[in-house]
Structure formats: C-alpha cells, structure tokens
Amino acid sequence: MSEPIKVGDVVMIVRWPHACQGGKYLGRVYTVHFLFDHSTCSRCNHTFWQTVGALDVEGPGVGAVPLAWLKKIPPLDEIQRDRLTDEVRT
Ligand SMILES: [Zn+2]
C-alpha cells in the first residue's frame, strides 16, 4: 500500500490545500496518466515543485495534482482477493 503512485494507478484526491479551483475536485477518483517533476497552476502561476501526476478519467481531467494530495486506491482485483480470503477463513 505504501508503494509510490505510478502511471495507471487509480487515485482519489484527498487534499486540496491550494486556493484555486476551490477544492471542487476533492474526493474524486482519477487514473494517473503522467508523472511530472513539477507543474504550474493555470490560474495563479504557482509552481508546485513536488512530483505531480496529470489525471484524466471520464471527460476532462484536472491537469496536474501534487502527489501529496492523492491517496492510492488498490486495484479491484486486490480488493476481491482480500474478500475471497476472508470468506474462505470464515
Ligand atoms: Zn493557483
């Protein structure tokens, strides 16, 4: 679970400390398409020096989001495997 976020991962935006966009993307789930060294806010030109992932799923994405704002969601097959293991145990 503590593996670094990489391209193809499903992530949820769990933090939005930046004032621009008003956190309207908070709680949404996206797929990571790119990883960048840094990116710039399209509204206020603030540079985020952390590594960021550009996200896109179902229509327009949110551009780039710092990795620190994201929580990785385990793939569905892992969740199902855990559930199956639980069922076998009980
Ligand atoms: Zn901004």
Image (tube, rainbow, N blue to C red):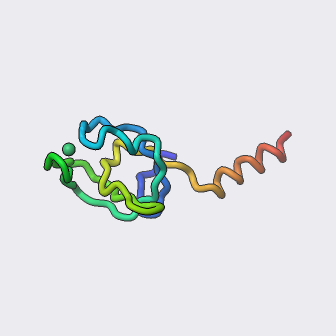
Residue 84 as seen in the image, left or right of residue 26: right
Q: Residue at x 41, y 59 (%)?
A: 32
The correct choice, above or below, for 8 with respect to 49 in the image is: below
Q: Residue at x 29, y 43 (%)?
A: 21
Q: Which residue is depicted at the point 31% across and 38% down? A: 22
The number of callouts visible is 0
Q: Is residue 55 above or below residue 67?
A: below
Q: Is residue 88 above or below residue 60?
A: above
Tell which of 1 and 51 is nearer to you.
Answer: 51
List x then y, in percent, for residue 50: 24, 48
Q: At which x and y percent is residue 83?
A: 74, 47
- Find ligand 1 in the image and state its quadrant: top left
Where in the figure is residue 77, as x and y percent of width and height?
66, 58
Q: Residue furthest left?
A: 45
> Which of the 4 image quadrants contains residue 90?
top right
Does 59 sit left or right of 74 as displayed? left
Nearer to me, 67 or 57 = 57
Seen at 43% across and 63% down, the residue is 59
